[in-house]
Image (tube, rainbow, N blue to C red):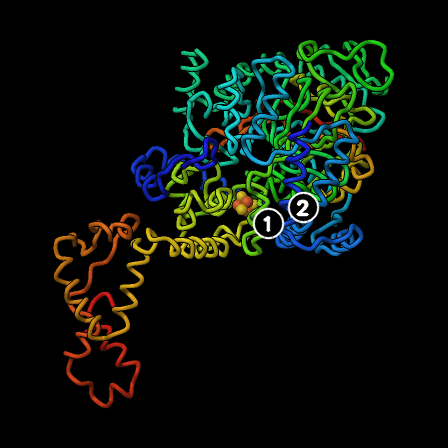
């Protein structure tokens, strides 16, 4: 586009004019590396305290949290789904079959090499919920991060259905936000979603109200 | 003349607009309640981090570094975003940004689009522009929806409808969504918004957003939100257009580890807001098939050239300075008559208009410094305010109107009077006589005639005392040797017998 090309040139020229002397890339990089980063970049809590903090934070946001043993995942998932009255759930295509309890309908969606087209938003809206894993979780802020990686599926999957059941392995929980970025950094090109509790708003009189457009109900199983 | 598109809404100045708002007690109490609540939460969650100051230092350093090499990082962003399947457009000003966005929308032959809250689109006046071209933009953020349906203007850039309470919101929703039975609990109101918008999320094919951050190294865009309306717009439509100020770029993905701590804690007083989305370009089978970024200059680049006010562009729009500001606390956001309210608005708005508009805004501050103290990227707002006041005065003095202006005349008169004791006491005697009709029962002056009204418009003034210090000093009995040699006793004597007001 012609005019946009000249706009580009003009904006960059105007910036350079304002900034004056330019630096070559290596020196910019060296300057960047020397920026002060004296904030906390590693956690200090024991594994036990870290998991307790994670649980507390999620509960503060109004999520249901439970610690479960590795060999009880399937049973615990069944328990949660029954308690929430869910029957039909959408899942990422690569979710381990061993997680899936009998008596529920699981509809795989998204992921590589699928044969059927992904569900449309309206179809997804007809589901009772979604069941996924995650990439990493942050105890200090009660956040869980999805990266469209293994066991996580596409972004719509954990957005449209009104209920999300998320399985987090204890080893995936870090204490601080910077530690989570250390994990995410190598796959930073993937769509990345941090969620901290169910969707909420404080737009009316600054009261945090659960549930606007994202899933209004969230349960987290932390697997030891 | 005012340009057709402006982030500054009217020709009224701050004191005029503020006077009107100060009389609206409902709005004032809504604003006070909301800012008190956010501020208390913000203080709690920033106070609990032992490394809060180190995070501020890092945030400041990263933002300042990005601005110092803005051309470099923007080009890097453009390359990476394009490689990931995105399309980057550049807009010199508001009109150009609007044209680009309209063109992209028209290519898809739609007449309705989704919007995620973006102050940048308010700045360029996108919605009214699209409206005149037959395109309706649906705001999806709850607060923006309240503003849009209520035909109102945002007053705060994190909680744009904070000047409205639940009863007022209910009235708007009842009327505009045709829900006469709607309840007044915040839950009822949120759920009304959910059903009103859900159908639109599923049906509309084009969404327009802003962005909180751009990442130069991988071309990623980051949006921070609460409700999930952002995720809906970023995920479901086929086409996504993000309008972003050129200053929003960060060098690397990992820089977010600083800002995703400082922004939510400063903005809403949460350890983390419910949702953050970060994406690069287009990903087959997941999200929009077409992604555009419109980079907006709109007079940002010249600000980079002023060493003292460049820091204005470090802003990450957390609005903590609004909540902390005693002036904002009293007047709310509308008094600033500008998209960007509060202390940051007071320095940003006039600069975005090359000091041609919003000239009264740098005076809308008592320079108490609360804004600087809370700022997560350490923008020294009082310093920039004073700098801009200086620039405005300097410019004024170059014009005849400025030279005859009240400030200039006042300062010249003061210089003349203060230079001579005799002239000063004569002026004081004249003042003591002349003021009689303006002094109220409490001994205060609330309103003076023009041209002195400029001073009393925003403050009450103590009347001149019956006796000035100089009069008292010359009329009092000569002090004894002892009290002269005893400053303590002399002080007491002055305290008892001195004229009031000294
Ligand atoms: S100036 Fe600082 S405190 Fe104010 S909105 Fe910007 S980042 Fe926040």
Residue B59 located left or right of residue B432: right
Q: Residue B119 at what x, y percent from top left?
A: 53, 33
Q: Residue at x 79, y 42 (%)?
A: A182
Q: What residue is drawn where x is 50% and y is 29%?
A: B125
Query: To which residue does mark 1 refer?
Result: B304
Residue B461's place in the image compared with B77, above or below, is: below
Pick the front one: B417 or B118: B417
Q: Is residue B169 left or right of residue B469?
A: right
Query: What x and y, as percent, mark residue B425?
Result: 19, 71
- Marks 1 and 2 sit apart, C-alpha to C-alpha, by 9 Å
Which chain letter matches label 1?
B
Q: Which mark is residue B287?
A: none
Element under disc 1: helix
| Disc 2: host chain | B
Decide which of B394, B223 is in the foreground and name it.
B394
Instruction: Confirm or deny contact between disc 1 and disc 2 (CB under 8 A).
Output: yes
Quadrant of residue A14 within the rendered picture: top right
* Mark positioned earlier in the residue sequence (1 or 2): 2
**In what quadrant does ligand 1 lie?**
top right
Tell me if the residue at label 1 has its CB under 8 Å from ligand 1: no
Q: Nearer the viewer, residue A80 or A1?
A: A1
Q: Position of residue B220 (x, y in %)?
A: 72, 34
- Quadrant of the image containing the C terminus of chain B: bottom left
Q: Is residue B12 visible?
A: yes
Residue at image location 74% in from the left, 11% down from the top: A119
Which residue in the structure is indicated by mark 2? B70
């Amino acid at each position: 586009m012609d005019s946009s090309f000249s706009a580009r040139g003009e904006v960059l020229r105007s910036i350079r004019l304002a900034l004056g002397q330019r630096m070559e890339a290596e020196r910019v990089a060296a300057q960047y590396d020397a920026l002060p980063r004296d904030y906390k970049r590693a956690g200090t809590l024991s594994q036990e305290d870290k998991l307790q903090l994670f649980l507390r934070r999620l509960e503060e946001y109004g999520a249901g949290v439970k610690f479960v043993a590795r060999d009880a995942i399937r049973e615990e998932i069944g328990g949660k789904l029954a308690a929430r009255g869910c029957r039909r759930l959408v899942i990422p295509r690569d979710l381990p079959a061993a997680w899936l309890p009998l008596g529920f309908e699981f509809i795989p969606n998204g992921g590589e090499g699928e044969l059927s087209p992904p569900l449309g938003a309206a179809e997804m809206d007809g589901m009772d919920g979604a069941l996924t894993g995650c990439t990493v979780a942050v105890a200090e802020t009660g956040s869980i991060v999805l990266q469209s990686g293994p066991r996580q599926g596409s972004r719509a999957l954990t957005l449209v259905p009104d209920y999300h059941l998320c399985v987090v392995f204890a080893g995936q929980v870090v204490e601080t936000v910077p530690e989570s970025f250390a994990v995410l950094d190598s796959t930073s090109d993937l769509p990345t979603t941090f969620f901290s509790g169910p969707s909420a708003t404080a737009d009316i009189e600054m009261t945090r109200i659960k549930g606007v457009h994202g899933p209004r109900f969230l349960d987290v199983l932390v697997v030891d | 003349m005012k340009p057709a598109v402006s982030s500054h809404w009217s020709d009224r100045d701050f004191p005029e607009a503020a006077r009107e708002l100060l009389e609206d007690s409902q709005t004032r109490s809504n604003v006070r309640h909301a800012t008190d609540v956010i501020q208390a939460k913000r203080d709690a969650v920033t106070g609990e981090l032992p490394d809060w100051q180190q995070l501020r230092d890092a945030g400041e350093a990263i933002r300042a570094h990005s601005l110092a090499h803005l051309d470099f990082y923007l080009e890097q962003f453009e390359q990476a975003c394009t490689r990931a399947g995105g399309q980057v457009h550049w807009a010199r000003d508001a009109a150009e940004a609007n044209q680009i966005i309209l063109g992209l929308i028209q290519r898809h032959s739609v007449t309705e689009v989704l919007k995620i809250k973006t102050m940048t689109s308010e700045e360029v006046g996108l919605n009214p522009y699209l409206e005149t071209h037959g395109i309706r933009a649906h705001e999806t953020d709850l607060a923006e929806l309240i503003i849009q349906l209520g035909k109102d203007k945002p007053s705060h850039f994190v909680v744009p409808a904070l000047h409205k309470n639940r009863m007022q919101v209910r009235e708007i929703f009842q009327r505009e969504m045709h829900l006469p039975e709607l309840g007044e609990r915040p839950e009822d109101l949120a759920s009304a918004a959910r059903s009103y918008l859900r159908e639109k999320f599923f049906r509309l094919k084009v969404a327009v957003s802003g962005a909180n951050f751009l990442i130069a190294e991988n071309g990623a865009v980051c949006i921070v939100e609460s409700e999930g309306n952002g995720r809906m717009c970023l995920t479901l439509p086929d086409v996504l257009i993000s309008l972003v100020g050129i200053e929003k770029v960060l060098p690397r993905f990992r820089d977010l580890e600083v800002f995703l701590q400082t922004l939510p804690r400063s903005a809403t007083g949460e350890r983390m807001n419910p949702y953050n989305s970060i994406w690069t370009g287009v990903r087959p089978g997941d999200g929009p098939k077409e992604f555009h970024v419109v980079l907006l200059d709109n007079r940002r680049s010249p600000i980079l050239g002023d060493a003292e006010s460049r820091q204005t562009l470090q802003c990450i729009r957390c609005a903590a300075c609004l909540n902390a500001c005693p002036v904002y606390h009293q007047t709310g956001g509308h008094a600033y008559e500008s998209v960007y309210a509060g202390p940051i608005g007071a320095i940003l708005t006039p600069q975005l208009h090359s000091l041609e508009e919003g000239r009264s805004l740098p005076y809308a501050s008592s320079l108490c410094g609360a804004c600087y103290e809370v700022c997560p990227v350490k923008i020294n707002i009082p310093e920039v305010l004073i700098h801009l006041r200086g620039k405005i005065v300097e410019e004024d003095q170059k014009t005849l109107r400025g030279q005859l202006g009240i400030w200039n005349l006042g300062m010249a008169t003061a210089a003349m009077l203060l230079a001579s004791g005799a002239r000063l006491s004569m002026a004081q005697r004249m003042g003591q006589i002349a003021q009689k009709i303006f002094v109220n029962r409490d001994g205060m002056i609330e309103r003076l005639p023009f041209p002195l009204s400029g001073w009393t418009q925003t403050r009450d003034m103590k009347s001149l005392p019956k006796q000035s210090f100089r009069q008292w000093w010359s009329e009092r009995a000569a002090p004894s040797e002892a009290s002269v040699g005893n400053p303590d006793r002399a002080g007491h004597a002055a305290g008892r017998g001195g004229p009031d007001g000294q």
